[in-house]
Amino acid sequence: MISKATIIRTVVLVGAVAALEVACRTGAIQPALVIAPSAMVKALAETLQSDDFGGHVQQTLSAVAIAMTLAIVGGFAIGFVLHWIPFLRRAFNPFLAAYYAIPHFAFYPLLIVIFGLGPAPLIVLATLFAMVAMIVATMAGLDRVPRVLLKTARIHRLSLMQEIWRIRLPAAAPHILSGLKLAVAYSFIGVIAGEFILSTSGIGHEIAYAYDNFDNPRMYALILFVLGIVTTFNMLVWTWERRLARRRGMAS
């Protein structure tokens, strides 16, 4: 059964797209600023058929996939360790709190010196940008495991690994999945923003090139493509999260 929240979100989204379509078609918004959503979809279909599109997509998505994997796995592992070792957490907390105030792209010249030219500096940059979100989410989830569940684990004499696998991780799953979604978004932002100003290929470079040449159809088509990928991935995670929530409800 479709929830009321889903219906409201759908109505708002469809209404916003329809309003933008009407505004663009009637001239209320000039095509030099924004093109109509239908024109974006048409431009995206044409862009997907272009010969050079596949290479740019492969470069960007492979870099995002590597950065996303490193950020999620590494962020979860570091967050788990910091949760279990309080003195390390106290030492790193100030850095984690101020992390996103640091201009990460300022380190790109240093990363070029260390890793050389190519996709490696962008991957490292995106990984560093996304990992802290996963670290913070993992710690927040493990911190909020209800004490009654931990007492239940001790009553049933579960081993430490059984307690972690059956109690702590399922209870922390909502926060961890939220961190996963943020890590995905930040990985895309890190790679594409880096390509925007620091690369000669990739989706980010193509968006910047289209912008510089006033090619609005291609620019918005590429932006729509990125939004579609990120939205699809987040919807898959959201669906998985809902299934886990239903299972917990049935178990209780």
Image (tube, rainbow, N blue to C red):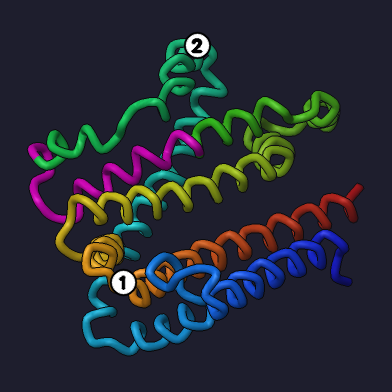
Asked whether the viewer can see residue 138, the reply is: yes
Which numbered dot is residue 130? none
Q: Amino acid at mark 1?
A: Val
Residue 47's image quarter? bottom left
Residue plotted at (35% across, 72% down): 216
Q: Which residue carries the number 1 mark? A: 57
Q: Residues within 10 Å of mark 1 (few under 14, many from 20)?
A: some
- Amino acid type at image mark 2: Arg
- Place of residue 235 in the rendered image (x, y in percent of width and height, measured from the top left): 63, 63
Whole-percent x and y of residue 78? 45, 31
- Image quadrant where one finds the N terminus: bottom right
Which contiguous range is marked in magenta?
A: 113-133
The reply to whether residue 58 is visible in this rendering is no
> Residue 76 or 213: which is nearer the viewer?
213
Q: Residue at x 74, y 30 (%)?
A: 145
Which tag is nearer the camera, tag 1 or tag 2? 1
C-alpha distance separating marks 1 and 2? 41 Å
Residue drawn at point x = 73 percent, y = 39 percent: 171
Q: Is residue 206 above or below residue 110?
A: below
Q: Is residue 100 above or below residue 62?
A: above
Label 2 CA crowd tier, 10 Å (few <14, some 14–19, many 20+): few
